[in-house]
Image: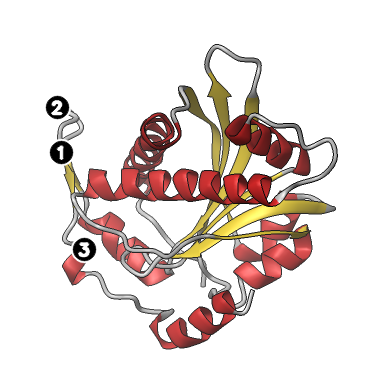
Amino acid sequence: MPLLIDIRKLTLITRLIQDGAEQVADSLATLAGVDAAVEIKSLSFVQPEDIATEMGGGNIYSARVRLTEPPYGVFLMTFETETAAEIAELMTGSSVDDGFTQLHESALQEMCNILTSGFIDGIANTLNATINMGTPTVVQDDAAEIADKALSHVRRDSLTIVLDSLVDIKESDVAFSLRIFLIPDPGSFVHLIDQLDYDTDRETHISADTDAVKELDMSGDADALDAFDSSE
């Protein structure tokens, strides 16, 4: 059965996504000393089985983390090898022409930490809530393999929010594209969205009682997910 969301709530979802992007820009400035603009180029909804198609083919990089508070589920960020090289060079100031060094790999992990936590924190701040998560798992692999691993404990009737974003580094010619897949627990996400209280005239308040939102579909798989993440 497909996941149903009140069409009137789409504005709220868009607002949450935009706030997440703004927090990413703030986090880049604060934690990495990088002045950047983060733009959401497009937002769409797909079924989980279509994620591999959305990713395209070939080897790509991904950063994946499981959310342990509402809306639960999986946050997955993907980017091309060329983007990984741009990020590594930006963070270290050294070329990757001779391959990635340990310093480059560490810098890439750190950037993925900043991007992931910034986006999730932006959503959480807007909800007046906290969304706990671990450190993202960063891998380079075939797109189909990345999709399979990310979806191994996700219900096939889940809603997947797909974002195409552009991180434009100011006063430079560096700009890199990121594709974000937010795959929340379906029941928890609908419950959370239905609880949102947003004054669309004043545009001043969004809140949700996250304590009342339970993880309906993935709590039984928590140990399996933890074991899976630690094995990579």
Res. 153 in view: no
Q: Amino acid at mark 2?
A: Arg
Mark 3 residue crowding within 10 angstroms, few (<14) / some (14–19) / many (20+)? many
In the rendered image, residue 108, in percent from the top left (x then y), is placed at: 61, 46
Residue at the spot x=62%, y=77% of the render?
A: 152
Element type at mark 2: loop
Q: Is residue 200 left or right of residue 91?
A: left
The answer for how far apart the CA atoms under marks 2 and 1 are is 8 Å
Q: Is residue 39 left or right of residue 19?
A: right
N-terminal-most mark, 1 or 3: 1
C-beta proximity under 8 Å, tags 2 and 1? yes
The answer for how far apart the CA atoms under marks 2 and 3 are is 23 Å
Q: Is residue 50 above or below residue 55?
A: below
In the rendered image, residue 164, in percent from the top left (x then y), is placed at: 59, 38
C-beta proximity under 8 Å, tags 2 and 3? no
Res. 73 in view: yes
Q: Nearer the viewer, mark 2 or mark 3?
A: 3
Mark 2 residue crowding within 10 angstroms, few (<14) / some (14–19) / many (20+)? few
Q: Which residue is mark 3?
A: 210
The answer for how far apart the CA atoms under marks 1 and 3 are is 15 Å
Q: Amino acid at mark 3?
A: Thr
Q: Which quadrant of the structure image shows residue 83?
A: top right
Q: Is residue 193 left or right of residue 185?
A: left
Residue 205, label in figure: 1
In the rendered image, residue 92, in percent from the top left (x then y), is placed at: 61, 35
Q: Which residue is mark 2?
A: 202
Instruction: Decide which of 104, 214 is in the foreground and name it.
Output: 104
N-terminal-most mark, 2 or 3: 2
Q: Amino acid at mark 1?
A: His
